[in-house]
Image (cartoon, rainbow, N blue to C red):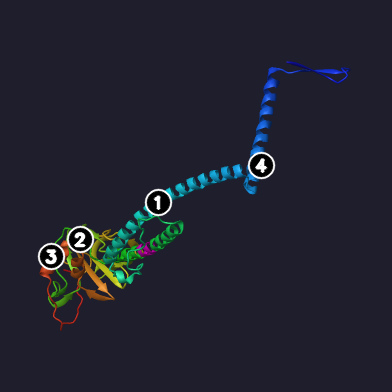
Amino acid sequence: MHLIITDARLARSRAIHLSGTRLILAGLLLSLCLMLVAVTLYHWVFLKGAREGWPIVGSLVRLVVKDEFAERDRFMRANLDAMARRVGEMQARMVQLESLGDRVLGLAGMAPADVQKSDGRGGVLVSARNLSMEELQSTLDELERLTNQRVDLMTVLESRLFDQHIRKKMIPTHAPVTGRVPGSAFGWRVDPITGQSALHTGLDFQADTGTPILAAAGGVVVTQEYHPAYGNMIEVDHGNQLVTRYAHASRTLVKQGDIVRRGQKIAEVGTTGRSTGPHLHFEVLVQGVFQDPQKFLSAGGTAAGAQVAAIQPHASPGQPAIPAAGR
């Protein structure tokens, strides 16, 4: 396209050549300018009409604003209803959690009265009516408070149950020699070497040389030595001044300072020291005082404990305690 531009007196002229690309760019530029002008006028007219209360423009603005608020209100109401349903489900789960917490409290040996309850009514209640934003926020805050309280409770329960678990593992209730019938039990008997009455301070397990000796509970090895009476001997400290002793071993597998777990192999049966044959002499001491190992094994439900209970002799209360190792 060629455009010729002349002045009023036709004294000068100028020719402009427009190609297809230039025409397209010029059209786009013109369209953009028209759109900007239209948007500016529309915005200016509606704002001015809304502020000054022009009849037609004011009605249109109120209509648009009303529809916008109605749509926003429907959207918020739908979301509030959905949130209220979710809060109701959370409330039901909180009630179940409180019931579960009470049962676990019983297992942990704690009375429900020892733990602060919410208000005795099972927590917050979400009704079926439409909730306002303030009511919903208040309900959520209450649920958060109850949740934090339950978390604290479960933390206490976890600590109590873990403590009970550890204490149970530290009590010598595991049979030190499995699958064997105990020989001499704890109590007064005729010493097989001297032929005199003496207190047998432990429990004997008859077994072949090399039979594994197991730790009756977890603890720390405090003694691993050769004793003239006990032979190769191991003592394990379980805390609270509770010690177990394993005597007459042919071979010891742990040393002083080692940490052993419940049921771990720590030695092998033998006949070292003051012994008349291969066996394990097993003792339990509390605050340095000899205790009947059968009581501990019976508490653990072991077969050895049950078998010893049937043959356990009763010491006379008037007789002095004279330690006598060996069979």
Q: Residues within 10 Å of mark 4 (few under 14, many from 20)?
A: few
Say which label, 2 or 1, has the lower sequence index.
1
Which residue is denoted by mark 3 in the rendering? 307
Q: Quadrant of the N terminus?
A: top right
Check residue 44 in the rendering and tell me which mark sits there, or answer none.
4
Q: Is residue 91 left or right of residue 179?
A: right
Residue ID at (13%, 80%): 316
Say which label, 3 or 2, has the lower sequence index.
2
Which residue is denoted by mark 2 in the rendering? 177
Vertical arrangement, residue 76 with respect to residue 121, above or below: above
Q: Residues within 10 Å of mark 3 (few under 14, many from 20)?
A: some
Query: Which one is closest to the eye, mark 2 or mark 1?
Result: 1
Main SS of the magenta part reads helix
Say which label, 1 or 4, has the lower sequence index.
4
Q: How many numbered callouts? A: 4
**Residue range of the region highlighted in magenta in the rendering:** 149-155
